[in-house]
Amino acid sequence: MKKIILGISFVVSSIFAYDDSSSVTIRPHFGYGTNSTQHYGLKILKASNANQAYGLEVTRFTTNIDQFTAVGIILEERSYSWFHSSIGTVGYFNYEANNQNIIGLTSNLGWEPHSKTLFKPFIAYRNDVIFAKRIRTIHSISIGLRF
């Protein structure tokens, strides 16, 4: 799975590299949430202006009974130079025992310091809503780096 995430990040970053007018942000993250849910993943975002970006997210979830992957399109906005929020439409793959591929929504609300350094830490509240037969909500705290 880590090889897939790394491969996707190289492909997406090479696609974004063709346009010199805006920068690319890479956000590796990991976190822990409700019902012992752990996750790790990567967001690759391209700036559309000084405060907004769009891109791709790949995240691997591990619970005490299941493992599944989320891949989707993310929209992000920074406000007040330290607050970031994002929302996205995500596909959850190999979900539950019968390996369903279903759709859901993810959102993040977080803090990120305003600085000119290469690596910027961030912390965010993450919410995933998975539209299975029984709607599931995962609340978690994510931490990571932005570069």
Image (cartoon, helix red, strand yellow):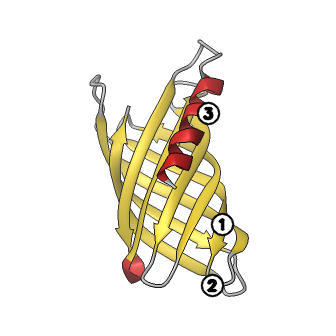
Q: Mark 2 points at which residue?
A: 97
Q: Looking at the rendered structure, which numbered label has been put on residue 12?
A: 3
The tally of labels here is 3
Q: Looking at the rendered structure, which numbered label has been put on residue 93?
A: 1
**Looking at the image, is 49 positioned above or below residue 33?**
above
| Quarter of the figure that contains the C terminus | top left
Residue at 47%, 31% in the rendered image: 25
Around disc 3, counting alpha carbons within 10 Å, would you say few (fewer than 14), some (14 to 19), or many (20 or more)? some
Counting residues from the N terminus, which is met first, the one under dot 2 or under dot 3?
3
* Mark 1 and mark 2: Cα distance apart in space: 11 Å
Along the line of sight, which residue is nearer the eye, 127 or 59? 59
Residue kind at label 1, given as amino acid type: Phe
Helix, strand or loop for disc 1: strand
Residue kind at label 2, given as amino acid type: Ala
Rendering coords of residue 109 (x, y %): 44, 55
**Looking at the image, is 12 positioned above or below residue 131?**
above
Residue 25 as seen in the image, left or right of residue 14: left
* Mark 2 and mark 3: Cα distance apart in space: 30 Å
Helix, strand or loop for disc 2: loop
Rendering coords of residue 64 (x, y %): 42, 83
